[in-house]
Image: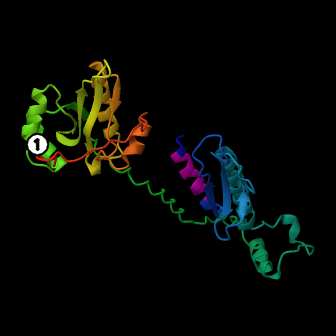
Amino acid sequence: MADADRDAMLRDMAANRGCRLVKSRRRTPGVGDYGRYGLRDAASGADVFGISGDGLTATPEEVEAFLRKGLVSDWKSSLDVAAPARPSRRSRGPERSEPEQAAPAARSRGRTNSPAPPPRNRPALRIVGREAEPLSPTPPPPPPAPAPARPILKIREARPADAAGLAALVGEDGVAGRLAALRKAGEPPLVADEGGVIVGCAAFHVVPLLQHAAPLGRITFLMVAPAARRRGIGRALVEEAEARLIETGCGRLEAPAEIELGAAPDFFRRLGWSRSAYLYDRAAEGGQSAD
């Protein structure tokens, strides 16, 4: 028998006994009173069977046996109450203990030819409405839809088509011409491309030195869009620039501390860089403006 059919049968039997079936709410086998049942009085709520301080204790079979035993007892007792005791022939003498109102009936039976015994009353059946099925627990709301996947981030060399995106990031005009010059010099900037949107840029250069055989690698520009910061984009740009500068044979790498990242010194320290010197600078009089 399926669990649902068995539970329905036990509920009906309990209702006919004036009880209410209680079923464990545990859903994990072996935990607490999982799979156990009990009975409570439907009117008073008092514990009747299979309920203790630790929870429910009766199995479905034990509840069924208890209810069936009770039904048989009720049926037998109803027969005893419903069927009147037939007076025996020997009890017609003066020693019979029947009520006075039964005497005329006894005398009338003496004047007739063995009347048929009164029909035996059937036990009265008590009709009890079926206990309402407990409402099933409200299912939990569906999980929220997953956030749309973030576009894949690509670190690549800047192309001429990136000029507009770089101009929006840097906030400068004339980026297209400078980008073309850097590409022609073999030092194209790096861009962080996220789904076709430029969210970061890094420019780097190889500087030959008179005092050292190995050239100096210098990151001259690093910027990440404010909305895209704290996501590792600046780190990805620096690591790619480092790899390219080392491939060219640079012996040392440097970057200005005022790079547009916000808290730039801490950013470079987390990448393993250390602050080693202060730079002096001034505007070149008569030269082209750096702005």
Could you say where residue 10 lies in the image, as x and y percent from the top left? Answer: 60, 52
Q: Residue at x 83, y 64 (%)?
A: 88
Q: Counting other residues with Cα less than 10 Å from the Cα at mark 1, is it few (<14), some (14-19), or many (20 or more)?
A: some
Q: Position of residue 140 (x, y in %)?
A: 44, 54
Q: Is residue 125 left or right of residue 98?
A: left
Can residue 3 be seen here? The reply is yes
Q: Is residue 63 left or right of residue 222?
A: right
- Quarter of the rendering containing residue 71: bottom right
> Which stretch did the figure color magenta?
4-14
Of residues 115 and 184, the one drawn nearer to the viewer in this rendering:
184
Q: At 30% across and 26% down in the image, what residue appears? A: 216
> Residue drawn 93% across and 73% down?
95
Determine if residue 147 is in view: no
| Relative to 5, residue 128 above or below | below
Q: Is residue 261 magenta?
A: no
Against 8, residue 218 (above or below) is: above
Mark 1 lies on a secondary structure that is helix
Residue 84, percent across and down?
A: 74, 68
**Residue at (40, 54) in percent of width and height:** 141
Could you tell whether 277 is left or right of 132 in the image? left
Q: Position of residue 170 (x, y in %)?
A: 18, 47
Quadrant where the N terminus lies? top right
Q: Main secondary structure of the magenta part?
A: helix
Q: Residue furthest front?
A: 285
Q: Is residue 165 above or below residue 187?
A: below
Q: Is 14 or 116 nearer to us in this picture?
A: 14
Amino acid found under the numbered disc labelled 1: Val
Give whichever of 26, 215 is nearer the camera.
215
Residue that mark 1 sits on: 175
